[in-house]
Amino acid sequence: LKGGMEAISSFDDDDAGEGEEDEDADSVVFDGDENHDGPSSPGGVLFPSHGDMSADGNSELLREREELRKELSDARRELAQIKSQVKLNEEDNKKEKDKLRALNEDIQERLTKREEELHVVEQDLSKQKRSLEEVHNEVNDLKEKSASLADELDVEKGKVLQLRKTEAMVEAYRKKVESLESANQQMGGL
């Protein structure tokens, strides 16, 4: 497309240059002789293939000339349409690029915002992890203390059982002593 546009531009430049140099854009110059009044080939024929020119030959040349002018005009019109289409395409491309640039900036802003939010969440998560580790350490310390207290409690329960047994023995001895005293009193009263 770019190469085609360069060729079109050079064609236009050439075309514009010709219009400035010659008053008659359709004039044909042979052998570099612009001021030559007659045809350059022998016999007064402009193109040797046309042979002897009569009134019909001139009209045919004029008709051919008009056809060529029409084709040139059509080509210029087509060239203008292509140029306008290229210009429209360039404008559309610029608009699309601007849209993409704006979208890219928006996405970059959102990404930056998300990264900041992620950083804050990571910091909070890190703080919570440290707090959780501290709580785990406290729980482990409490478990150790609980186990130690459970051992002490077992020891104390054993002592309580021993005391109860001792109390029961003391009570049994006290009852025996009382019964012996009462038997001694009965025997002494007799």
Image (cartoon, grey):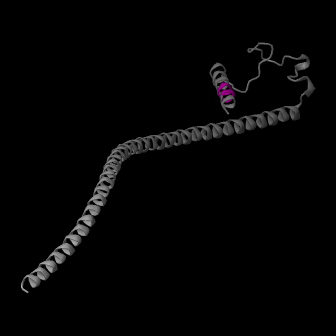
| Relative vertical location of residue 169 with respect to residue 186 in this rendering, above or below | above
- For image coordinates 21% across by 69% down, the residue present is 167
Residue 165: horizontal and vertical position, in percent?
26, 69
Does the rendering let one see residue 181? yes
Image quadrant assignment for residue 119: top left
- For image coordinates 73% across by 34% down, the residue present is 72
| Relative vertical location of residue 54 with respect to residue 32 in this rendering, above or below | below
Numbered disc total:
0
Q: Main secondary structure of the magenta part?
A: helix
Residue 160: horizontal and vertical position, in percent?
24, 64
Q: Is residue 128 left or right of residue 156?
A: right
Does the rendering let one see residue 52? no
Between residue 53 and residue 71, name the one nearer to us: 71
Residue 116: horizontal and vertical position, in percent?
38, 42
Between residue 92 and residue 113, name the one nearer to us: 113
Magenta segment: 6-11
